[in-house]
Amino acid sequence: MDQKKVYVAKRPPMGWNSWDCYGASVNEEILLGNAGYMAENLKEFGWKYVVCDIQWYEPTADSHEYHPFVELEMDQYSRLMPAVNRFPSAAGGKGFGPIARMIHEMGLKFGIHILRGIPRQAVHRNSKILGTDRTAKEIASTASICMWNTDMYGVDASKEGAQEYYDSLFELYAQWGVDFVKVDDICRHVKEPFYEKEMIMMARAIERSGRPIVLSLSPGPANIEKAHQYERFANMWRITDDFWDDWKLLKAMFERCEVWQRHTGEGNWPDCDMIPLNVLGWGWGTGKDKKRGWTSKFTKDEARTMITLWSIFRSPLMLGTDLPQLDDFSLSLITNDEILAMNKNPYQAFMSSDSSSDNVVIWTNDCPDDLEYYECYFNVSEEVQTVKLNITIGSDDNIRDLWEHKDLGASTAFELAPHACRAFKIRVTK
Amino acid sequence: MDQKKVYVAKRPPMGWNSWDCYGASVNEEILLGNAGYMAENLKEFGWKYVVCDIQWYEPTADSHEYHPFVELEMDQYSRLMPAVNRFPSAAGGKGFGPIARMIHEMGLKFGIHILRGIPRQAVHRNSKILGTDRTAKEIASTASICMWNTDMYGVDASKEGAQEYYDSLFELYAQWGVDFVKVDDICRHVKEPFYEKEMIMMARAIERSGRPIVLSLSPGPANIEKAHQYERFANMWRITDDFWDDWKLLKAMFERCEVWQRHTGEGNWPDCDMIPLNVLGWGWGTGKDKKRGWTSKFTKDEARTMITLWSIFRSPLMLGTDLPQLDDFSLSLITNDEILAMNKNPYQAFMSSDSSSDNVVIWTNDCPDDLEYYECYFNVSEEVQTVKLNITIGSDDNIRDLWEHKDLGASTAFELAPHACRAFKIRVTK
Amino acid sequence: MDQKKVYVAKRPPMGWNSWDCYGASVNEEILLGNAGYMAENLKEFGWKYVVCDIQWYEPTADSHEYHPFVELEMDQYSRLMPAVNRFPSAAGGKGFGPIARMIHEMGLKFGIHILRGIPRQAVHRNSKILGTDRTAKEIASTASICMWNTDMYGVDASKEGAQEYYDSLFELYAQWGVDFVKVDDICRHVKEPFYEKEMIMMARAIERSGRPIVLSLSPGPANIEKAHQYERFANMWRITDDFWDDWKLLKAMFERCEVWQRHTGEGNWPDCDMIPLNVLGWGWGTGKDKKRGWTSKFTKDEARTMITLWSIFRSPLMLGTDLPQLDDFSLSLITNDEILAMNKNPYQAFMSSDSSSDNVVIWTNDCPDDLEYYECYFNVSEEVQTVKLNITIGSDDNIRDLWEHKDLGASTAFELAPHACRAFKIRVTK
Amino acid sequence: MDQKKVYVAKRPPMGWNSWDCYGASVNEEILLGNAGYMAENLKEFGWKYVVCDIQWYEPTADSHEYHPFVELEMDQYSRLMPAVNRFPSAAGGKGFGPIARMIHEMGLKFGIHILRGIPRQAVHRNSKILGTDRTAKEIASTASICMWNTDMYGVDASKEGAQEYYDSLFELYAQWGVDFVKVDDICRHVKEPFYEKEMIMMARAIERSGRPIVLSLSPGPANIEKAHQYERFANMWRITDDFWDDWKLLKAMFERCEVWQRHTGEGNWPDCDMIPLNVLGWGWGTGKDKKRGWTSKFTKDEARTMITLWSIFRSPLMLGTDLPQLDDFSLSLITNDEILAMNKNPYQAFMSSDSSSDNVVIWTNDCPDDLEYYECYFNVSEEVQTVKLNITIGSDDNIRDLWEHKDLGASTAFELAPHACRAFKIRVTK
């Protein structure tokens, strides 16, 4: 029958990603520092992936900006390698192997970011490709570049040697012990194409590598018309452009979740993007004042709304922050096991109000026996809303408030502040 | 929990629709003639719906064209009624009740077509609505018309009396004994909006009517971003604009089926539109030469490709033709029980080749135990293609050719003419 | 040769329009009150058109909102007539004749607003049309309505009787003594079509009427791809959607003026829309508190920027306000003869900076002898900008500040506050 | 005042371009052969530009296809130079100087083609730029490539050194004696941006070069919203994508000419693209059968329609063919002085029928005294059309048939075959 992805993530992946706080300036110390914090404080709640985001192969990267046309660390087979000045353990051609091992020893998983394609410097030098006589120049796509970074050319799937190139990449990542690859510049469908054939080549390369690597696609918005292809070949894919600490973006996410609501489940995790928490942009500065940063602009209500929506929708949960600096409130958001249980529950959720543009948006999840399910109420308007639960409570029934960790009595009406939410677990007896 | 559609069609509906052959000129005699043929010759294969298409309320309708701003048959509550000159049994306010009864007595089901909205003549006369003090003028949408017909204004869901109007319609249809309502001018999303809220009002009206009426939406292309709403409230919805006997349209259907492939299943039947067979356009003429008509322009290969795709994709199967005039070849297409079994099988099918734009497009269906499944090969190119089945056949395995009604031997390669297809049922032992 | 418009406005029309202050509730008293003020205070500066905006035929109109599907005042030939309760002098079928005469006696010109098309009530009653046997039903377009008002259907130019209908309208307006017709719902090209053929029918009807009537088209944005057709058949056409007292809209006007810069001149007046001044929305209220209103939200700098841009671009100048209530500052803006002289000058202006998105946008006008021209500087950014005139001043040259009414000395550099402008007339000796 | 282009072509440029017949394989012999033919046979009719199209700097170019990422001939300052194997007189760094001199000596003008931007090989080698310390890497645009050729990166106007780069290019071309530069990959506005700022840099570089070089922009369709900028900075710009010998493209040109009709005149020559005549694609072959070619697929009527439309619209006339191989009919088309006189006449033409989608499209030109003007009738339908001239002929008036070279008598009605045209010069006495 059909070829499908070989690794299927049972639950939405949970972890940390370096971008929101460190941009392209992340280094070995930062990676291991965050991994250490996760192992000690978060692992028990299910958090496990530590992901090194973009440009680990760029020796001079020092902010969130990219240096155009700069020389990159590359092996003889056109494959990018970690910059040793930023990742000292990579010295001697060992790549990310040592870091992966250290993170595995903490009981965690290790992920890296790559950009779709082959380095432009390999093409203009016409470098070799492992496993084929074809060269970089011969497999590069003539009209496929990333619009915001000059590192790569796309790879043309119709050329001999193209699949071999991707095979050689994932073979290397498997050797290093990589568990998760976030591929960038691949799945936006606004103004740019979805690079479907490069995704398929990578999925095949993962299969051939023999290692269960999560394939995560970025940036969005992914094209719902191609949902079935994402579902066949990848484990998670972004459903919006980059998400940040801005209410407008959070509000817009409700509509995107509505669109993708029937596409979640084993191995299919439409991705709301990283969760910007607390300390952000720490490594984003340029020039002298390199260590700029800011604190998330979300109010507490908005932060809870974000966590609640990501959880009931069952988005992957990837933290964007510096974990060691987390404050108590932020920590409480991501260690609430009753909320996280929604994210881990096996049933699909859906918008049960009529429209994402209503004042109060309601999400519920499927419940085969109609006995126990979640229901979340979000006030996406600018005014206080009075909400009445659509439930008749019998004496044996229970409504559990997941943020407050308490059972509710008979009263099923409440006020909801603008941008705030309530999350309930409902148990009914028939 | 959530309100969902109350009637869920277990299998894709199968039947006949008057439009392709009779346009707006269908009448009682034609309806009953086709019903009689179906009862005698097709019922045993699963065909059962007899659907009267557009403008049964227009006394002067005599072709496939509409007469603008013409007087329509209407009751005192702004509800359109069958034109008695065309449907004599409707006399005395009995509406479609007598026809529905006659069709039910043949062991079949009866369906009608309506246009979304309220008659413009009701609005400009400000007629009453049953069950409310509000009047036609007060519930009409001010900027919502059908782009190709002048009968109706849309209904504004935010107005008091709007739901009551739709309730009054479906209450009447339930009284008549209608089993299937095809709502037109509602779900196209190209240039025109999807009238989501009118769909929801109709779904609620069906629920209140207490009768299990199939809700069928037209025309397409439906918007895949709203798939979840179609799935909550309707049973079938068109995925393209009108389909006719033209290879370009048939070829384009492969891409549309690809897009909708993961949205089929109990109660969810993305609809490839009527199957134009044999005699077409019989009642389409205007003026003197009113009885024009033509024979389907599809070759035999193309006709088989159409039936095969509709079947494996599990589209509803609605015949567009004059049943009593069917020739032997056409009849053989719709009475092949091995092919129809694909349509009735419970598992979702998907495109298993890489792309709808490949020369040979392959469709397979899910198969929980990997032991028995369908595989169809379509040559959508203009050249002969050599195809090799992607299967190793053991001595206990079997490949059944569904069009030829025979088991294949060891050979799993074949040539496929342009526009032709092969359909197999594969049984493997593990 | 070619048929062209017969009336060619030599200069951009200047006048007052009732909409911005009175919405659809304007009446005879308001019209004559504003005309009286104009005759006494503004006429000498070139202001002359008094335009009665939308729905003068709707007896119950009392705000800026429209009553859907309401009964309209109409003659036996499907032509709308002034509602006598609002325009008492129209009694006895005299229409706008008496008001036109009164305004002419003040030395001013009179204009009315119409919506493209034929009244829906005429179509559904199938009323007559003057000068043809065809009826309203036969010339109405089946799929052409206004998206924001229910009064009319479009007229289908391919139907016999269509031209006669428009001829009968403009014959009536000519009899009344109308000098200016603002046609609405005709020239927007975003989401809706430009109704090119109805424009051509109206231009021909004006020609046949024998009266030099200004044809003004609304709303915008007009389609620059059809500029040549506007130029052949109309005198002015809107280049944006409705303009109001909002900096964002004012800033966006710079880009629209850039696009249309080479299309101004005799008879061709791309229209920036009414100038909202001082007292606005006086008749916009609904229900009890009908007399609501507000004061323009523009700062003084912004108001000057608006007047300056409209003037140098040579937009028509139509005041949106209640003239008798004008305050001194607003009055000074529209009675500055040095500024208005830019609007009346015969040479085309153009954006002479590189781009509308620069911080400081510069507009200059053509100057055949390079000896005397205008130059306006607009700070469209949010910061103070330092500007240096690109001129070497000789001892015989002069730079005149048109807002300050004074000659500048040697200094040609200045600071410009955000949203502010400077307007100069430059005279150089060669 | 304003900076404008310094060279203003008084009449639409007329000449020959190597692309349609030779693709990227043109060489010195071909250039001079065509120049010789032009000097001898066409010069007297106004033909004068000999233009060497794309990739004269690519030593291995041998067809109409481009070799991706190939090594280009380049000087030390990142400037491309003619490949000496194809243009032997360029040896010793003399560039196109010798060829320009030879063509000038024939009494003709010389033009070259360039692609917007800086060679990618210069960027990846970080080559120098003449007249600045900045290097190729520092001025290249990070996300601006040509979609169909891998030679160049765009140049970022906001970077120091960018203007100097373009200055150094045009200084070199002026030294060579180039009279005409066709810049490619710059003015299409469908899917790709119009590279407005690179156009402005080039216009400034031409000004600084001191040589009157025609600036011609390609490909189209140019964006009518930016017409004023083309008019300020360039002399001609393409209004469609590539034009070839295909009736569909010719028919579509009527609509494009309609759109651009009011934008022709001194220095402003919207460009209908090369005129494909007779022998085409002679140098387009690849591999062994390199010398393929074909004869224009236009019928004689269509060829006349093309020449007539280009002439009355006043498009530049650039021949796409191998001049020495011209047949008699083709030669007669481009040496008809009465037809060419329309192209050279000083008055703007316009579509005088109502619409480009009418069966017969009529073009007329402005005529200040209404005494002498052109009128062309084009049958763009698939049926014969009967046409009646809209003229009353007096005894002193004259209608001249420009293709037939004869005066017409009293009859002003005629039949027009599908795709055919008639061109008249009309003289009337008042």
Image (cartoon, coloured by chain):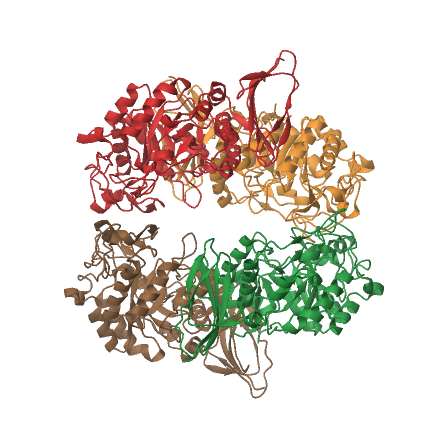
Chain colours: A red, B orange, C green, D brown
A396 shown above or below D354:
above
Q: How many marks?
A: 0
Q: Residue at x 50, y 62 (%)?
A: C421
Residue D383 in view: no
Specify whether A175 is left or right of B208: left
Q: Nearer the viewer, residue D69 or A256?
A: A256
The answer, for residue B222, to whether it is visible in the render is: yes
* Quadrant housing the C terminus of chain A: top right
Q: Is residue B22 left or right of residue A316?
A: right
Farthest right residue in view: C92
At 75% across and 64% down in the image, what residue appears?
C33
Q: Which of B351/C77 is in front?
A: C77
Looking at the image, which is closer to me, C265 or C175? C265
Residue B347 drawn above or below residue C205: above
Q: Is residue D2 above or below residue C384?
A: below
From the top left corner, tell me how far across and down residue D53 is, in percent. Answer: 29, 63
Q: Quadrant of the N terminus of chain A?
A: top left
Answer with the quarter of the image where residue D308 lies: bottom left
Residue D235 placement (x, y as % from top left) = 38, 69
Residue C30 in the image: state x and y as whole percent: 75, 61
Q: Residue furthest bottom?
A: D396
Q: Position of residue B358 (x, y in %)?
A: 39, 39
Direction from residue B309 to residue C206 in the image, left or right? right
Furthest residue toward left: D92
